[in-house]
Image (cartoon, coloured by chain):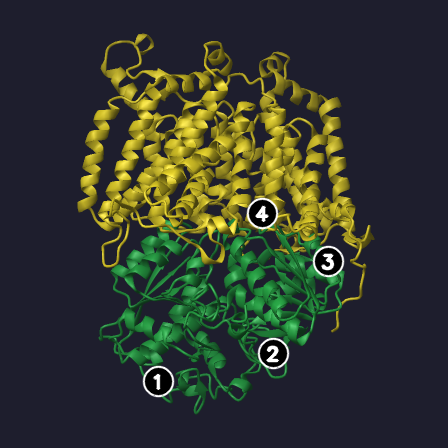
Chain colours: A green, B yellow
Amino acid sequence: MSASSRMGKRARGIGALPLVAALVVAGCSETGPVGGGDEAGAAPDAGNQMAAGGYVPVSDEGPVVERFPDANWFNGEVPSTAEAADPDAEPVKVGFIGINDGPIAALPELLQATETAFDFINTELGGIDGHPLELVPCPVSLSPESSQRCAREVLDANVVAVLGGINVLGGPGITLLEEAGVPYVGGVPVGVDEVTSPISFQFSGGTSGAFAAFAADAAQRVKAEKVGMVYVDYGPVADGAHEYGAELMKQLGVDDVIEVTFPLASTDVVAPIQKALDAEPDALVVGAADTSCAPALDAIADLELDGPVYMVGACADKKWLDQVGIDNAIGTIFNIEGRLNQRVVDSADSEIYNEVVGEYGPDGLNPAGAATVSFRSAMNLWAVLDQLGAGATPEQIIESFRSSVDEPSFDGHAYTCDGKQVPDMPALCSPQQVLAELVGPDEFAEVSDGWIDVPGLLNQL
Amino acid sequence: MDRRSRITEPTVSSHLGYLLLGLGAGSAIAALGLGLVMVYRASGVINLAQGALGMFIALAFFTFRESGRVTLPLLGLPSSFHLIDRPTLATALAVFIPYGLVLGALVYLLVFRPLRRSPPLAQVVASVGLFLYLWAVAELRFPGEVLIRTIVDDTGRNVLGRLVTSDQFYIAGMVLVGAGVLWWVGAHSRFGLATTAAAENERGAILAGLRPELLALGNWSLAVCLAGTFTILAAQLTRLDPLTTSLAVVPALAAALLGGFRSYGAVVIGGLVLGMGASELTNLQADYTWVPKVGWQQGLPLLVILGVMLLRGRPLPERGALAAAKFPAAPKPRHAVASTFVVVPVIAAAMLVIGPDLRSGLITSAVAAVISLSVVVLTGWVGQISLAPLAFAGVAGFSLVRLAEAGLGVLAPVLAVLVATAVGVLVGLPAVRVRGMSLAIATLAAAIAIEELLFKWSWFTGGVEGVRAPKLSLFGADLSISAPGAEFPRPVFGVVCVVVCGAVALGVAQLLRSRLGVAFLAVRGNERAAAGAGVDVARVKLLAFAISAALAGVGGVLLAYQRQSLSVQSYQVFASLSVVALTYLAGITSISGALVAGALAPEGLIAALSGSTSSSTTQFAINGLALIVVAIVAPEGVTGVVRRRVRGLADRRSAVPTQIRQSPSPQVGS
């Protein structure tokens, strides 16, 4: 029990009107370790990602794409030469809806990373058939009416798609996009509509993916007979933890799952963790997030368990680990949505991302965490538009996503948007997870055998 | 797997052990509760910003320990200044005890002293403003992580089979000592005795040579300093977050309430019961499948409080203030029917021709005005302070969805309003026994209980699948806000909202003119006198709760149709507080006040006309300041000020001296 600190101005948790609560737990479960490494991967703190296997940029000058000759990325071969879009050509408009500032939740890097991606696309990838991509951003406040206003504004601008940011209380806006038939792509899904709407396409597994991955690992690799689960008592998160965690474990052969909840706004998780450990489980799953990450890690450090402890990737953030002391957190297993060893996937995505952020990103943009989510979303949308051409209609974009099967995703697992990847959450296109154990300061090692097939697991339910 | 060595065998299930695990959390609640009682005894204010004040001081303290910089909470001043390099704990305490004292004094002098003769609700509004301000300023002033250093030894000890850290005992001990000191000071010191005397009879205290305002200043300083000190100490247990820490005031209010806002000892016991009870509930929910897993840890204590209030029925101690602060006069609406039949058709017609921005703003304002009318009826006219209007709206909204799914068609909205009405009556039951701020806290507790126990219930509010409202239609006619290919929002939905708002306003106006309306105002003026005049006070109060909840239910149904996708978060308690605050500031005793409150609502008419959609943290802080300023300069609300000015002009025009003129508009109650 050591010094601790609080989260900076980010996705301000749940505490914050339990609303954003779900945020970190549900949507942002991958803001932990991502990206490169060899045997062990590095934590994703700014500038700390290890070079992807074989894809060391040949130069730090000139167009980014030309720094990676003969390399592959998510969209096939990295273009050998940069090509700018024609600034005089009619732009292809894409909306962006999200909270940029405010005391409840503020992730300005989501918009910044999207703008960075668009700059890169227009400067080096030729836009869409030479037509520049134009971003139509609309900041929302913490009211359902503002999300409606933003939806109306971007629809009035004749956008062909809308990229998501973090949009607390965004459901009413998404229903309007749904009626207009305009796709809503990516971002940090914190609301129910973002994971259920038929026009929403998300490249994340959210809580369901995380809990399913934990369940699979505990049941199949660890062969646990008894598992403790501690999670917040916030409706959707609690439902997801029970449905996709506890029920799946039982399906996979775990005899007993002890479920204990704690209030969303509470940071006192000692009692629930002790309760879960009373039954001497073989493994412990802790669905804490944001301000409850450090208290949970603290409590686990003092209460020892002869088995693995699983936590959502959001708790692997360096600031939480620093608070509790790295020694107290070693051995904890986190879910992530990227491979630690890039050699396995033969892709320069991670390195190109870092180069693009350095080249086109604004000062102070942290390449780790939430920025990766919106950059991935923007690149995946670009890839679809690139296939469809500058005249792509919203209907065509929706159809393209819906018909996708194992479509390569930028720096993430291939996506399939058939609406069947996660029961009840048809918008989740790539819920696959990787589990990584903290093995040292800034060092993680994969414990799962590559990607965990979350859709395959959940279809057993 | 290389994990830590086992400290304790987590096998013994001991209820006492789990109770002990909640000792630290309970102590933190109790410490805040002590400050609440101090402030209430000294100035009659229930300070909803007590937790926020403690939070700010604690964040500033830990920032100072790392950087040697002292953070200032006033916008416009430099955010901080450097005082010393690498301060020790002793140095930091030496700086921050005076810091807390000064901050408490400033809060009293700048915010609550000017409000000492204002109605209690004005003080509640100001404390909500202060809460919002401190929250936002904390976000601005402490944008990064603040390292919390351990102050009290936190070695883990195996107690009754549970690992309990030492700091829980130390902090509990300090809270007990603090309560003891407060009791002693209150009972034996000149300062304490004078405070008690001034609280019981301010006029008598002045005649005896005491200075109640100076006493209040001293108590505020000490209470805020106490909040800061214990928040600093408890931070190693509870962590610090601008909002989460500020919201700790809710259970602290409950503890203070259990202590009747009188007894420091009872407050400590109340806080410990709440904290330790929540821990024990964690234990029970895993052992007994019938114990719900969602909401009960926070919801059950609030239900207990409601039950205690209902059964005990002892109100908070009344302060013998110099002048009893009352609500502004309630003007009887004039020309209500004619106004409605002129204004509503004009606005409805305008809906067909104005642009979508303005139309959207009008719709939002019309719906918000309906909910504000529910506040006017209950609080403005009957004097029952209720802080749960949006909870009723939420109940109606989610009920609408479920009833529509059950195939009840056109009956669904009607039944949804009835459900909200029934819940309103239940929440109003304590009003039969308590009034004033006691009731305000009871309704606040009820709002949170509804949030915890009802809104977290997935069957009711959707869970992972969410909730979509049905489309509004009547006998086959599509009246919904949106349709594929249609302009948003559709004018027809705007017409519906304006007509409903107009009808509700007219109904409310007629209500005030009825015998029931007279009874409302009689109860507001003086319950004993009303009872003496033959008014069944309990029945009138419950009727007021029923009507108010029904109006909020109508607003909730409209909100559901407007938003289409419902989320629990938009009905949470601070949204309710915002509605009450806005209505109060616009004019809580008049229909025009409710309409102005609707216009001022976020994304409402004023926002649409001004084009202002700013939601920055700075804007949030300014909004909090605005609440405080308006509560001070216009305690009768914006419409009250306008009415007074208009009347003043009329008075000047006529040659008749003001003091012998009759008021041009009949007013009832005061």
User: In this rendering, would B370 be left or right of A355?
Assistant: left
Q: In the rendered structure, which disc, 2 or 1, sits on the residue that comes first in sequence?
A: 2
Q: Quadrant of residue B200?
A: top right
Q: Which mark is residue A444?
A: none
- What is the crowding at mark 4: few (fewer than 14 residues within 10 Å), some, or many (at least 20)? many
Which residue lies under the disc numbered 1?
Answer: A82
Residue occupying image coordinates x 72% and y 31%: B265
Residue nearest the observer in this picture, B76 or B632: B632
Do tags 4 and 2 sit on the same chain? no
Alpha carbon separation for disc pair 2 and 1: 31 Å
Callout 1 environment at 10 Å: few (<14), some (14 to 19), or many (20+)?
Answer: some
Q: Amino acid at mark 2?
A: Gly
Residue A11: in sight, yes or no?
Answer: no
Between the residue at mark 4 and the residue at mark 3, the CA separation in whole angstroms equals: 28 Å
What amino acid type should be assigned to the residue bearing mark 4? Gly
Indicate the secondary structure of the residue bearing disc 2. Answer: strand
Residues tagged 4 and 2 counted as in contact (Cβ below 8 A): no
Which residue position holds label 4? B295
Counting residues from the start of the chain, the first of labels 3 and 2 encountered is 3
Residue where numbered disc 3 is placed: A1
Is B641 placed left or right of A279 in the picture?
left
Comparing B189 with A28, the one in front is A28
Residue beneath disc 2: A41
Q: Secondary structure at mark 1?
A: loop
Outermost residue, bottom side:
A70
- Residue B425 at x, y = what percent? 48, 30
* Vertical order, A413 against B415 (above or below): below
Chain of residue at mark 4: B
